[in-house]
Amino acid sequence: MNKEELLKKYEATSNEKAKDVFFSPGRINVIGEHTDYNGGHVFPAAISLGVYGVYGPRDDKKVRLYSGNVDGDIVEFDIDDTNVEKDEDRFWANYFKGMITYLREKYDGIDHGFNLYIEANLPSGSGLSSSAAIEMLMGIILKDEFNLDVDRVSLAKMGQRTENEFIGLNSGIMDQFACIMGKKDSAIFLDCNTLKYEYLPLALGDYEIIIMATNNPHTLADSAYNDRVAECGRALKKLQQKLDIKALGELDNDTFDEYSYLINDETEIKRARHAVSENQRTLRATQAMKDGDLEKLGRLINASHESLHYDYEVTGKELDTLAEASWKQPGVLGARMIGGGFGGSAIAIVKKSEAENFKKNVGKIYRDAVGYDASFYDAEIVDGTKRI
Ligand code: ADP
Ligand code: MG
């Protein structure tokens, strides 16, 4: 997206001068799905699809938000009055309000209003973390423009709190961490239990990552997501009768197998088994990445999808169609759904020379099976949220 154009669009909605332009990326996740809130590992990366924000300070206390992607008027509120009931009509403003509220709770200095024009080339509600991109955009803007002494990881935590307490989604830290801590051409190997992390170059050689959006907005996903969090929580509690653990991510497959009788509930066993096995796959996949064993990485990615399908039951027809169609194509190392599930997006690791064929073939299979088109994007891995 062009900076000049963004500035023009800002000017069309504001009388005050624009000061700075920021970009906040969406994310993919190579492997480690639904492991973050289970104290396991994830392996995400920030992508060049994201949300742009043009910021202009105001002399008064007004905050005026305008999204180029949402029909309707400017959302306006007083900077001192953000900790209000959620705005149900203009729900998107809540992601900003949450961040403003939590930053003001901890830091002094946000003492005047501002105008913010945002525009995304990241599809919203597609499992690519537009919500975290927006939260981290707001976080970095406030940090930079008001000189707040807050570090990036703390901003990620505030974004998670915004989702948990303001939005009502009991999600983990992965999305916000990936958006704000992203590094060009690397993925982040993050232990969500300790927040220790390591950047691993996404050295894929002749291969590239293709993002496939189902274009099926995951409308019912939030309540199903919270159900999964609760099911894993119940399984953990039962295991804690005999095991001294704080999270499912602390278990290996053998220990889980040995103690799973304590859970005594078919659904909860499946959910916990996914949380444990997915974390183990993530450890093995990142080791395979370090060893340069891309074929093994690909197989583990496929296995991740199967576990999300059979044990976690968060895939659905669209995501299964994309993954299964991908597995059949030449030059594909692996493919799986990413994000919360029930729609959203998938990724495939595809030989560059086969990429065009891949998109054509999978696109056709998807359209024939589902009745509408998927969207395909080449994943470019970029730095986290920043001023541009
Ligand atoms: P995801 O994070 O996977 O994209 P979510 O459901 O968590 O999906 O977040 C999507 C929500 O974020 C949208 O419903 C909307 O409220 C907000 N949002 C995303 N992109 C934009 C945008 N460009 N402008 C305004 N709001 C947006
Ligand atoms: Mg989100």
Image: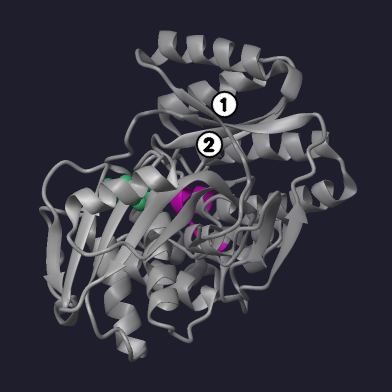
Q: Which residues are magenta?
A: 262-270
x, y percentage for residue 358? 63, 16
Residue 340 visible to an observer of this rendering: no
In the image, 143: left or right of 75?
right
x, y percentage for residue 19? 36, 65
Quote the CA–CA distance across marks 2 and 1.
7 Å
Q: How many labels were placed on the picture?
A: 2
Which mark identifies residue 323? 1
Which mark identifies residue 262? none
Residue 56 visible to an observer of this rendering: yes
Give the residue pinned by disc 2.
337
- Asked if the magenta segment contains residue 267, the reply would be yes
Look at the image and name its color scheme.
one colour
- Asked if the magenta segment contains residue 188, the reply would be no
Instruction: Identify the image quadrant of residue 355.
Output: top right
Q: Alpha-carbon neighbours of circle 1 within 10 Å: few (<14), some, or many (≥20)?
A: many
Q: What residue lies at 74% left-to-right and 35% top-to-bottom?
A: 298
Q: What residue lies at 41% left-to-right and 40% top-to-bottom?
A: 121
Q: Earlier in the sequence, mark 2 or mark 1?
A: 1
Q: Amino acid at mark 1?
A: Ala
In the image, 337: left or right of 32?
left
x, y percentage for residue 184? 67, 53
318 over 274 or under it: above or below:
above
The main secondary structure of the magenta stretch is: helix
Q: Alpha-carbon neighbours of circle 2 within 10 Å: few (<14), some, or many (≥20)?
A: many
Q: What residue lies at 49% left-to-right and 9% top-to-bottom?
A: 364
- CB contact under 8 Å: marks 2 and 1: yes
